[in-house]
Amino acid sequence: MWSSVQLGKLMVAAGVVLVALGALIMLGARFRFFGLGRLPGDVAYQGKHITFYFPLVTGAILSVALTLVLWLISLLTRR
């Protein structure tokens, strides 16, 4: 069972990671890091009065990357 101190540390670490991820996403929109956001396979439709964008491949790549990072963290923190 986790103590409240351990849970607090986990929440602070998760907050730091989320802030860093948010900053990276904001900068990525400005500088297009790694080409994310406009990959082949992302759905984009631009009509006369509407623009629709669904980042299908970008989402899949980010999902795989996040899964690998969380798996690695889980592997390293096992006792």
Image: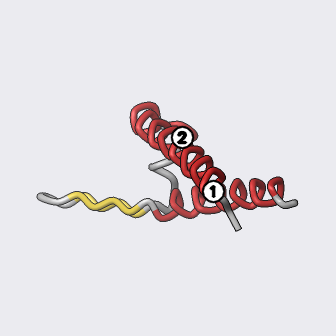
Please identify, in this view, whether the residue under mark 2 or under mark 1 is nearer the observer.
2
Tell me whether the residue at label 2 lies in contact with that at label 1, contact meaning CB atoms closer than 8 angstroms: no
Q: Which residue is mark 1?
A: 66
Residue 27 sits above or below residue 58 on the image: above
Question: For the residue labelled by badge 2, is the local secondary structure a helix, a strand or a loop?
Answer: helix
Q: Which residue is mark 2?
A: 16
Disc 2 crowd, CA 10 A, few/some/many (<14, 14-19, 20+): few
**Viewer-nearest residue: 44 or 62:** 62
Mark 2 or mark 1: name the one nearer the start of the chain. 2
Residue 76 at x, y percent in the picture: 83, 53
Residue 23 sits above or below residue 8 on the image: above
- Seen at 62% across and 50% down, the residue is 5
Outermost residue on the right side: it is 79
- Seen at 63% across and 56% down, the residue is 66
Question: For the residue labelled by badge 1, is the local secondary structure a helix, a strand or a loop?
Answer: helix
Identify the image quadrant of the C terminus.
bottom right
- Seen at 23% across and 57% down, the residue is 51
Looking at numbered disc 2 in the image, what kind of residue is underneath it?
A: Val
Residue 8 at x, y percent in the picture: 57, 50
Write down the quadrant of residue 77 in the picture: bottom right
The reply, left or right, for residue 17 in relation to residue 46 is right
Looking at numbered disc 1 in the image, what kind of residue is underneath it?
A: Leu
Identify the image quadrant of the N terminus.
bottom right
Residue 34 sits above or below residue 47 on the image: above
Q: Which mark is residue 12?
A: none
The reply, left or right, for residue 59 in relation to residue 30 is right
